Amino acid sequence: MINFKQEGDVLDLDPGATVAAGVGHLFGTALFGVAAVDAVSGTASSFVTKGMVEIAKTSALAISVGDVLYWDATNSVVNKTTSSQRAVGVAVEGASNPSATVKMQLGVRTLAGT
């Protein structure tokens, strides 16, 4: 196809801020990715936008398989807080309270349409 540019699992994007490898970033209001490398503002860097990742979570929070996860941009973690945060994935493995990370499927649309 003449207009095909690249697969969509990893996109080269400028985060407009410094983002450490392994940390998530919300582009606008709908595109979420996890930095595959240390990203620098003003430079297009690789962000994983599809697939399963292990990502930082609110430590004092238990998460179950299937829980919708939301991005807390202030603390650079996922959690289960629905107000003023964007759904970015779904837990594919449980994570206890306390724990630092959770395995998450990126970009899964929820039944609520978020």
Image: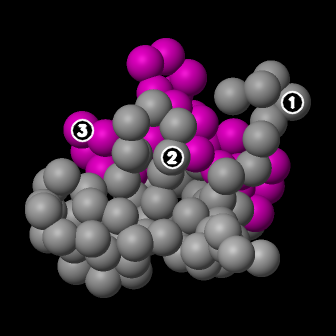
Residue 8, percent from left and from top: 63, 69
Q: Specify start and end residues of the magenta stretch as a single range.
A: 64-92
Q: Are marks 1 and 2 in contact (CB under 8 Å)?
A: no
| Residue bearing mark 2 | 31
Q: What is the C-alpha distance between the residues marked 1 and 2?
A: 18 Å
Looking at the rendering, in which quadrant would you find the N terminus? bottom right
Quadrant location of the C terminus in the rendered image: top right
In the picture, measured across the screen, residue 51 lies left or right of residue 82, that is right
Work out whether 74 lies above or below 107: above
Q: Residue at x 48, y 70 (%)?
A: 11
Residue 70 among those drawn in magenta = yes
Q: CA distance from mark 3 to mark 2?
A: 17 Å
In the picture as drawn, the residue positioned furthest to the front comes out as 2
Q: Tell me, yes or no, if residue 13 can be seen here.
A: yes
Categorize mark 3 by other alpha carbons within 10 Å: few (<14), some (14-19), many (20+). few
Q: Which residue is mark 1?
A: 111
Q: Give the label, 1 or 2, closer to the camera.
A: 2
